[in-house]
Image (cartoon, rainbow, N blue to C red):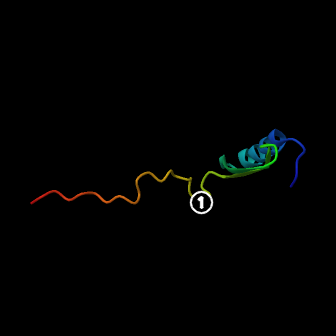
Amino acid sequence: MKFDILQQGISFYENCARVSCFDTRLYSTKKRKSDEKIYLNYCVCNKEGFRETPRLHTDRKKKRPIT
């Protein structure tokens, strides 16, 4: 479904979710490279998928203590 204004789409989806008894969250956005304006915003059920987590020091291993 397409909306002219981003906020109209978000409020529409939130109202539908409220009637169906579930919560929503914004999942991700897409911006145009030319002017950095948002042209696509994913609004999903709060149980949908996983939140993106920052990858901090995932390549490092914990040092084992000397025994």
User: Is 53 situated left or right of 7 in this image?
Assistant: left
In this view, which residue lies farthest toward the left?
Answer: 67
- The N terminus, quarter of image: bottom right
Who is closer to the viewer here, 17 or 28?
28
Who is closer to the viewer here, 30 or 24?
30
Identified at 16% across, 56% down, the residue is 65
Residue 16 percent location from the top left of the image: 77, 48
- The C terminus, quarter of image: bottom left
- Mark 1, Cα crowd under 10 Å, few <14 / some 14-19 / many 20+, is few
Quarter location, residue 15: top right
In this view, which residue lies farthest toward the right?
Answer: 4
Quarter location, residue 35: top right
Identified at 40% across, 53% down, the residue is 57
Identified at 20% across, 59% down, the residue is 64
Q: How many marks?
A: 1
The amino acid at mark 1 is: Gly
Check disc 1 and report the residue beneath it: 49
Quarter location, residue 63: bottom left
Residue 21 percent location from the top left of the image: 68, 48
In this view, which residue lies farthest toward the front?
Answer: 34
User: Is 36 situated left or right of 54 in this image?
Assistant: right
Who is closer to the viewer here, 52 or 20?
52
Instruction: Reply above or below: 63 against 12.
Output: below
Q: Secondary structure at mark 1?
A: loop
